[in-house]
Amino acid sequence: MRHPGRMGIFFVGAAAVAALYAMSTMRLPGPEDLRGQYMRIINSECVAARHVTDAVTAVNFDYRGFDTLGEEFILFVSVMGALVLLRQTDVKPGTPAPDALSPGRAVGASDALRVWILGMTGPTVLFGIYTVIHGQLTPGGGFQGGVILATAPLLMYLAESFDIFRRITSHRLVETAEAIGAGAYGVIGLLAIFKGREFMTNVFPLGKGGSDVNLFSGGTIPVINLAVGIEVTAGFVLLLYAFLQEMLERKEAAP
């Protein structure tokens, strides 16, 4: 189909979506009517009922955990789609990876940059782990901590080369971790069905509550949080791998 035809189909579809969106929101109450009720209920209930002090995490991984499951799989499918689109089809086995210090840059990373990045990689990993495992206690969680953890191998790429990036991420291992992280969320939700409860019901022991909440409080919330952290970390590392490989190959092919 020619370009004008495709654009016409797009605008017709966009107009229909806009009309449906306007119709669906026309009679909704204003944000002030909803925000106060929901906020008060969650703030008054989540600490006592779920033994967590971060109400946002309680909402994401418990009260509306089924919705968050869908959001996680949106990321999973997006990563898989990017890998399929950017996959290599004409590379012989044993071909060395493109080096970021040669085709990707005219000048390699300075010694000062390398020292700084090597010094920051450890704290970045620790901060990412802290953000993931403390998601039920403080602002943060698996999504935020996973993105932070994924920046650690990117820092190594900036300091060294793509070959080092590939070696420390172990492509097959990262793919496996992403699948396990995504699948674990659904498996945790199914455990409730085996106990005769609704899907995604919090069925694990809630642990200590009140002022004594800790890393093991919250029942399924910290476990789901950890699974999400693994999936998000692996997903973003895979995206970085695919995009960096594509970028460096294009630079190598350029005259």
Image (cartoon, grey):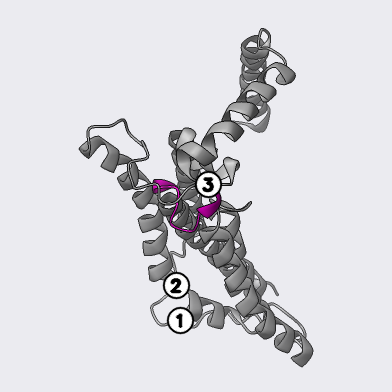
| Disc 3 target residue | 210
Q: Quadrant of residue 156?
A: bottom right
The residue positioned 68% from the left and 27% from the top of the image is: 4
Q: Quadrant of residue 194?
A: top left
Label for residue 95? 1
Count of numbered badges drawn on the protein: 3
Q: Pick whichever of labels 1 and 3 is earlier in the sequence.
A: 1
Q: Amino acid at mark 1?
A: Thr
Tell which tag, 2 or 3, sits nearer the viewer.
Answer: 3
Marks 1 and 3, Cα distance to the nearest angstrom?
58 Å
Over which residues does the magenta segment extend?
210-221
Q: Of helix, strand and loop, which one carries label 1? A: loop
Q: Tell me if 175 is positioned left or right of 113 in this view.
A: left
The foreground one among 166 and 63 is: 63
Residue 220 counted in the magenta span: yes
The foreground one among 198 and 106 is: 198
Q: Amino acid at mark 2?
A: Val
Label for residue 185? none
Residue 217 counted in the magenta span: yes
Q: Pick whichever of labels 2 and 3 is earlier in the sequence.
A: 2
The residue positioned 70% from the left and 75% from the top of the image is: 255
The residue positioned 45% from the left and 47% from the top of the image is: 218
Relative to 62, residue 138 above or below: below
Marks 2 and 1, Cα distance to the nearest angstrom?
7 Å
Q: Amino acid at mark 3?
A: Gly
- Within 10 Å of disc 1 (Cα), the crowding (few <14, some 14-19, many 20+) is few
Which quadrant does the N terminus fall into?
top right
Tell me if label 2 and label 1 are in contact, CB under 8 Å.
yes
| Disc 2 target residue | 91
